[in-house]
Image (cartoon, grey):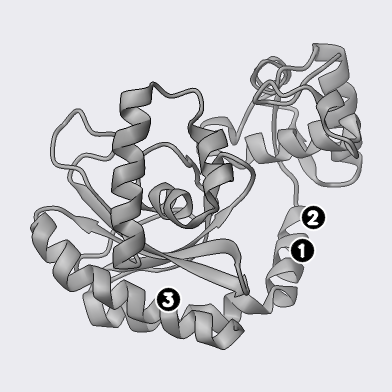
Amino acid sequence: MDQKIEGTSLADKKYSVPAIVNAFEILKLLSRNKYKESTLTEVANAVNLTAPTCYRLLQQLKELSLVRFDNNKKRYTLGTYLVILGERAKESLDFISIIEPYLAELTRGTGLTSLLANRVDDQRLTQIAKNEGEDFGIKISIGRHFNILDGDSYGKCFLAFMNEEERDELLKNENENYRLKVVTELNDYKSYGFSWSYSKGNRSRFPGIFGVSSPIYLEKGRLELCVSVVGMTAQFTEEEVIKTIGPQVKLIADQINQEFN
């Protein structure tokens, strides 16, 4: 049986419809910069489908204008109808329009790029709104995906403020010493009300970049989003990030949470 992109058997999902799940994996794949123009073989290999199955799905998506095929390049891209769906989704998700002015306020107060991150599935996060600082703001792309275990402030925020059972499940494949170290850090973040990452060395995944994130609950007790800022480590020491930037992010997150709760 064909499987999802991350190798989880579709049979494990009680209400799973394989064709729908696989089609959605294709759309998510084409939304990534690395795969925004892909051949049939590239798509099939990336989402772990056979070429015939993948071709049938791509043809159906093309008929619905959800995918476009360039005959000259022989490559697939996202389709034009997704532009309409995206605009309609943004109109119907009113929480984004409520939060955007807070992002602007956070950017004015810090001079940094602020953003809203959303959890896509168990392990992936994506950015769904942003406000870029004019002077020192980092340029970011809406829709970019991150793994919750990558070590950035978004992932740390979700890990710190989710329930312990869910967190333990995500960390179960890590070695014990690493788990103990991470749990200690996450407890610190929880006591501060925000998480942070500060990457100085070239061996870091995002060298020279820091981030601060605080949780957003659209419903009481339901962690869905985090509000964040990102900047360059040349601008602030880690101590300044914790003592100066962190409280500003938490204050905005608290104000947003008051809106919804």
C-beta proximity under 8 Å, tags 3 and 1: no
Between 55 and 170, the residue placed more toward the observer is: 170
Report if residue 246 is visible in the image. Answer: yes
Q: CA distance from mark 2 to mark 1?
A: 5 Å
Residue 81, relative to residue 74: is it above or below? below
Q: Tell me the quarter of the picture where residue 169 sits.
A: top right
Horizontal arrangement in the rendering, residue 210 relative to residue 47 (left or right): left
User: Who's the residue at 21% across and 70% down the image?
Assistant: 245
Residue at image mark 1:
84
Please name which of the two marks, 3 or 1, marks the residue nearer to the observer.
3
User: Element at badge 2?
Assistant: helix
Where residue 218 sits in the image (x, y, percent)? 62, 73
Q: CA distance from mark 2 to mark 3?
A: 34 Å
Residue at image mark 2:
81
Residue at image mark 3:
253
- The number of numbered badges drawn on the structure is 3
Q: CA distance from mark 3 to mark 1?
A: 30 Å
User: Who's the residue at 51% across and 69% down the image?
Assistant: 216
Disc nearer the start of the sequence (2/3): 2
User: Element at badge 3?
Assistant: helix
Within 10 angstroms of label 2, few (less than 14), some, or many (20 or more) residues? few
Which amino acid type corresponds to the residue marked 1 in the rendered image?
A: Ile
User: Element at badge 1?
Assistant: helix
Where residue 133 sits in the image (x, y, percent)? 29, 71
Horizontal arrangement in the rendering, residue 182 relative to residue 118 (left or right): left
Within 10 angstroms of label 1, few (less than 14), some, or many (20 or more) residues? few
Q: Tell me the quarter of the picture where residue 104 sits.
A: bottom left
C-beta proximity under 8 Å, tags 2 and 1: yes
User: Who's the residue at 59% across and 61% down the image?
Assistant: 224
Where residue 38 sits in the image (x, y, percent)? 64, 26
Between 196 and 133, the residue placed more toward the observer is: 196
Horizontal arrangement in the rendering, residue 140 relative to residue 68 (left or right): left
